[in-house]
Image (cartoon, rainbow, N blue to C red):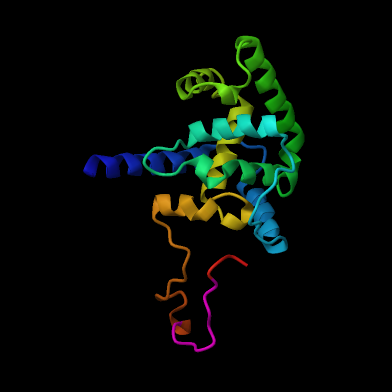
Amino acid sequence: MESADLSRRSLLQAIGVIIASAATPLGWTDIAHAMDGMHVGTPAVADPKLTFFNASEAADVEAVAAQIVPTDDSPGAREAGAVYFIDRALATFFSQLAGDYRSQLAAFQSEFRKQHAGSASFASLSSDQQIAYLKGIDKTPFFNTTRLLTLLGMFSLPSYGGNRDSVGWKLIGFEDAHVFQPPFGYYDRDYPGFVIPLKPQ
């Protein structure tokens, strides 16, 4: 159990480093403003649909995301629905990245077909084959952007389209609840009209 906790802690530390050092055309202020505006303007979607990707593109992006945060004894990017976050982000609050990302994804798929002519798609490969292929493209803008968006989709508010059933928050032990401790909120603890919403508005 101790080694498992250490492994999980190492994973979370690595995620923090990746997010902090991710190469992205957007500054962190831009990211925060874009996501904040989207959260305020659009309610959560119970049954998400793809709007940016077609089915083939979504399958490949989901497969890449699932290797970035894999499923083991805990849910990963696939269970968190990270691909729906990425799809929604590129169609809306990160639309300034959409053109470049679509070109990068097309190049990723084209190069894959050249190297694996007998395979239907990247998503159709075994996990070991996917990892081997990704090791050759892990410095590309496509992979860097996908990695960043996958992590945002794992740990941001579920109303943004990812973090399904709050699996990302459960992974890191985060509870979406008010903290009634000084200096934040302690004065509201006993207010009779105060109701903590169960889900983001």
Q: Quadrant of the N terminus?
A: top left
Q: Is residue 126 above or below residue 98?
A: above
Q: Which residues are magenta?
A: 189-197
Q: How many marks?
A: 0
Q: Which secondary structure is most common in the magenta stretch? A: loop
Residue 173 left/right relative to 48: left
The quarter holding residue 190 reads bottom left
Residue sitting at x 58%, y 49%: 162
Q: Is residue 191 magenta?
A: yes
Residue 85 left/right relative to 127: right
Q: Nearer the viewer, residue 124 or 113?
A: 124
Q: Residue furthest bottom?
A: 192
Question: x, y (%) of residue 22?
Answer: 55, 37
Question: x, y (%) of residue 9?
Answer: 34, 44
Q: Is residue 19 visible?
A: no
Residue sitting at x 45%, y 41%: 15
Residue sitting at x 63%, y 28%: 141
Residue sitting at x 43%, y 62%: 175
